Amino acid sequence: MEAKIGEFFDSVGNFFTGGDQIPWCDSDIIAGCEREVAEAEKGSSDELKSECIMRLSWALVHSRRAQDVQRGIAMLEASLAGSSSPLQVRERLYLLAIGYFRSGDYSRSRELVDRCLEIAPDWRQALTLKKAIEDKITKDGVIGIGIAATAVGLLAGGIAAALSARKK
């Protein structure tokens, strides 16, 4: 019973804080990945360059800085066409979905994660991201309804006050 109560309070806390289970990445890791890419550009194999770019893309879309996330999205979009295997496509689509989720474009994120799940229907990471997207969409809908209801209430209260002041 205590575990259920704990889960309830955690879910309520996550609802109001917007918490999700997707990791964040700090600028030190991004800088390290950028150094790796720069070193790989100096004559390494195409495979190593690709791996370094994927690590940098991962770090960028997991960043707290919006410009990093946008840069990661751009890198992934550019590399998606050159993906040869379904595994590479799946990974890039997933990272793009993370990037769009972080940037607040939940409909695009959901579309991309659905494409991941077409490739790998039981992929736990994609299923977890899909749930986080749906939770965020639900939360935003509830907040929107609350704002609309408050606006209607204020408007009705203002009209009622104006009418009662007019009758006096």
Image (tube, rainbow, N blue to C red):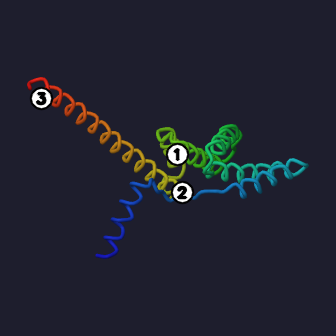
Nearest to N terminus: mark 3 or mark 2: 2
The mark lying in front, picked from 1 and 3, is: 3
The residue under label 1 is: 101
Locate residue 29, reporting x and y percent: 71, 58
Residue in front for this viewpoint, 134 or 63: 63
Rendered image quadrant of residue 6: bottom left
Q: Residue at x 24, y 31 (%)?
A: 155
Locate residue 154, reporting x and y percent: 25, 35
**SS label for mark 3:** helix
Residue lying furthest bottom: 2
- Give the vertical position of 163 relative to 146 (above or below): above
| Amino acid type shown at disc 1 | Phe
| Label disc, if present, on residue 115 of the rendered structure | none
User: Is the residue under label 1 in contact with that under label 2 (CB below 8 Å)?
Assistant: yes
The residue under label 3 is: 164
The residue under label 2 is: 22
| Amino acid type shown at disc 3 | Ser
